[in-house]
Amino acid sequence: MAYIGNTPAENYASFLTETFTVSATTNYTLSHAVTNENEIRLVINGVVQQPGSGKAYTASGTTLTLTSATVSGDVMYAVYLGRALQTVNPPAASVGNSQTAPTIITGQTAEATIATDDTILIHDTSASALRKMTRANFVSGIGGTNTPIIYVKNNAASLSNNTTQKLTMNNEIIDTASAFASSKFTVPSGQNGKYYINLEVETFETADTINTVKGLIYKNGSVYAQGQQIDAASNHAAMRPSVDCIVSLVATDYIEFYIYVNGTDDLAANTSATIFKLIE
């Protein structure tokens, strides 16, 4: 016989029958528990017995009680009418969307946001099983956040000519870890990693005679990276070099910013610096 879809797991099944060794008694023990006598058909000497209290028999669990005792030579058997025959798992990949309730996944739509304690299903390859984990643990397991983040500025900083000097960054716009103090960024405990650092400088003076400007990033008191702009004719009133780098830092490492200007008089600068930890 042909079928549309999966072939039924049970092609033929019969009811379970149990034959008893009779004796002069009204009490027998069933091999399989039942809820009540209506789940079995009892036959004695070829005659079907009527179930129920005050009738031929009652049954509960594995206890079968007759109204009248059997005698030697009687033939008695029971047919289990309500007993489950078998539990069958559906074939692999046989269940689709149409076989599941719409509520199996709330709304069956993608979520726009997810709470920290919401759970996410993942497949554990070692156990070949689906498991769940919270969004917070899931995010921490695949990387980190790009914090701390630092953004500081200083407008119209006064400069000395032909001198490398530390920049005073006195305007903290962003400092997520309170790690910038005295114009120096110090890596907080537990924040080891690779950092992106950028320094922007804009120097200017009144006599149009700036020759060279350098922006310098210092790590632990030594030059780590620098960028410069040079004008051999010395006819610039402003120069805007910038420098950026990626540096590996560990706790207590520190970053400072310096500038060098070669010009004449009334030298000043607008400066800004950005620092943030990269996600690895």
Image (cartoon, rainbow, N blue to C red):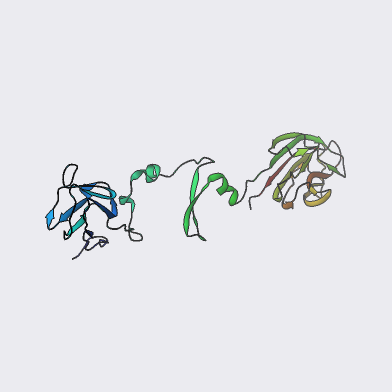
Q: Position of residue 254 (x, y in %)?
A: 79, 46
> In the image as oriented, which residue stretches furthest toward the left?
47
> In the image as oriented, which residue stretches furthest toward the bottom?
1
For the residue pair 208 and 8, the one nearer the viewer reads as: 8
Q: How many marks?
A: 0
Residue 178 in which image quadrant: top right
Q: Position of residue 72 (x, y in %)?
A: 18, 59
Q: Residue at x 18, y 44 (%)?
A: 52
Q: Where is residue 246 in the image (x, y as percent from the top left)?
A: 71, 52
For the residue pair 251 and 152, the one nearer the viewer reads as: 251
For the residue pair 58 and 261, the one nearer the viewer reads as: 58
For the residue pair 42 and 135, the one nearer the viewer reads as: 42
Q: Where is residue 27 in the image (x, y as percent from the top left)?
A: 25, 51
Q: Is residue 77 visible?
A: yes
In-image side of 213 versus 3 (left or right) = right
Vertically, is 144 above or below 177? Answer: below
Q: Where does the N terminus fall, quadrant-wise?
A: bottom left
Q: Can residue 270 be seen in this view?
A: no
Residue 175 in which image quadrant: top right
Q: Which residue is drawn at 84% across and 38% down?
A: 159
Residue 21 in which image quadrant: bottom left
Q: Which residue is drawn at 75% across and 42% down?
A: 201
